[in-house]
Amino acid sequence: MKTIFFLLQKEFRQIRRNKTILPIIFVLPIVQLLILVHATTFEIKQVNLCIVDQDGSAISKQLVHQMEGSSFFKITASTFSMEQAQQQLDRNKADMIVRIPANFSRNLMQQKQAPLQLIPNAINANFATLSFNYLTQVVQSFNKNLIVEWSGALSPVPIKHISVQARFWYNPEMNYKWYMYPGIMVILITMIGMFLSGLNLVREKEMGTSEQLNVSPMKKHHFIIGKLLPFLIIGMFELVLATLLGRLVYQVPLVGSVWVLSAFTFVYLLVVLGLGLLISTLAETQQQMMFVAFFIIIVFILLSGIFTPTESMPLWVQQFNVINPLAYFMRVLRMLMLKGAGFANLLSEFIYLSIYAVIVLSMATWRYRKTA
Amino acid sequence: MDNDKSIEIHVRNLVKKFGSFVANNNLSFDVYQGEIFGFLGANGAGKTTAMRILCGLSHPTSGEITVAGFDVYKQKELIKKNIGYMSQKFSLYDDLTIAENMELYGGIYGLSRKQIKVRIGELLEKLQLTDRQSTLIADLPLGWKQKLAFSVAMIHKPRIVFLDEPTGGVDPITRRQFWDLIYEAANQGITLFVTTHYMDEAEYCDRVSIMVDGRIDALDTPGNLKNKYQVQNMNDVFIKVARPDFFSQQYTVSSSHLNNQIN
């Protein structure tokens, strides 16, 4: 135990004097949390429309007016020629063409079907689907109003229709930042943990100081604990910083218990610190360590469902997440912060992460060689 | 060397292979307590490999080896308690101060706080660095760093100290001071196992062994070796052992030139 104290004292003295670690601890989280949360939003702010109104009637103008009234849509061009409209799409000036064919109002009046053509630019399929759906909603509500108006004019009793009122649970305002924030927190804690612990150990190998430690009677697990604890403390500090920043800047709620959050972060940090140490016991140089760690982090992040729902991935890809600690932690963090899930709901994730931590740390200790 | 002194390092038929390459080919020697044992050889002759095995940093392929009475196969950690090691690569922490480095290693070797304080005081006084104890290692000249590394290797008062080319790149005056420290340690009964490139340093050793291509080709006191090879200094002994064909060629070479050849 006494040895560990001396090792910790050494690590903290070195961290205090290190001119790059301190900025990493403070600047990295602020940059990630303040900028990346905005970078990863899928919310659609503005869809540029090109209107081709070949009908030119009062009704078609009313429809265009209703589109304009929506905060999502901006009419950037109006033309009568489909060719010109297509050029708008080609040059990325417009995101969607809305063509109102001739006889649109006449067909409506005669109670026939009145076709309307929507041509979205689907290079970004997600954006195209969303804007298509938004616009369809506008058209539907326009349609409904027309029916009510016209039939109301005929019958004295107003027509009853089913009204659907959606209420979105857990994130009532559908605030995308609330959804992304826990994800960015996971990335932050993962990067801090894996890189700081891993690079620290490899650096000792490069400097030759690890050999001086290897020739001493120090126990292997003392060494690993000495490398683990300082970064565990820094990682927990990052959690506090990130939670406060989220609350202050984006009003991200923490519905669940602070203690459950801390317990999960603690165990998760053991996993990523262990992974960092394990990689660095295998690597000889800091470059090698960086390459392997980057590879693992990128794969884990993209698989984890931070940016894209895992449910939309093919089943065999989803199955990789069994060994992806990020996926578990991310799920836990979202459930905790937004849904307020209790410990009992998250028990299986906790057991899983604990087993993962034990395995990774045992492997790192086993792989750390005092003797070549 | 008196033969009644106890044997601190006992090596019989040490072999170390890396794949098909034989780094140490059947080494056998004993090192006695309080002796300064010089371990010479050209670059790549296998000195560092053998030394790392004796320190428990590397496994031998075969052979019977005990260090401080402990077996290198089964009792590595016991060996490590009783030895000090100063590697070829400088290995104190640059971003810690002199006293902090000493404190760390004192702690790792299981000294109590009080013992550490006393030891730091002693070592600093001996090195005349008491007023510089809060200086970062990075800010010290190389010669001082080497002397410090040696002192730190001795913080736990080991029975044997291994020094791997301790004076590489250091000026002659500092080298001389360094050897004063080595003598002082030997006088206290500590056994010193030293590898070096400098042949003048070989003269300071009680006994020297010369390794060539993984074998020990000569082992005796410097005086006996000079008699045996009929030469004036250890430089020539080394060349006769390591490059037997060198003198048959009709060269007249200056001593400094020879030094370059060896280095």
Image (cartoon, coloured by chain):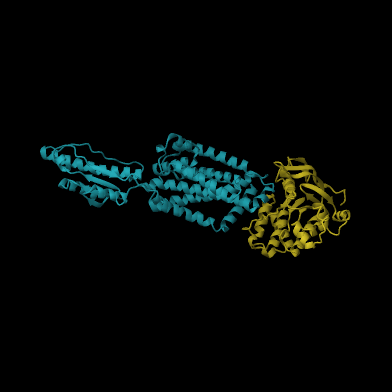
Residue A70 is at least partly visible in this image: no
Would you identify the image quadrant in which residue B205 lies? Answer: bottom right
Left or right for B70, reference A232? right
Is A72 left or right of B35, judged from the image as shown? left
**Residue situated furthest front in the rendering:** B250
Q: Residue at 72%, 51% (x, y): give it.
A: B85
Within the image, what quadrant is residue B202 found in?
Answer: bottom right
Viewer-closest of A7 and B91:
B91
Position in image of residue A325 (x %, y %): 49, 41
How many numbered badges does the structure rendering display?
Answer: 0
**Foreground residue among A341 and B28:** B28
Task: Report x, y in % for residue A150.
Answer: 14, 40
Where residue A371 appears, as percent x and y from the top left, is 68, 44
In this picture, residue A236 sits left or right of residue B146: left
- Locate residue A103, reporting x and y percent: 16, 42
Residue A263 shows in the view: yes
Left or right for A86, reference B258: left
* The color chain A is rendered in: cyan
The one of B7 and B188 positioned closer to us in this rendering = B7
For this rendering, which residue is in front, A66 or A184? A66
Viewport quadrant of the C terminus of chain B:
bottom right
Q: Residue at x 31, y 49 (%)?
A: A90
Q: In this structure image, what is the colour of chain B?
A: yellow
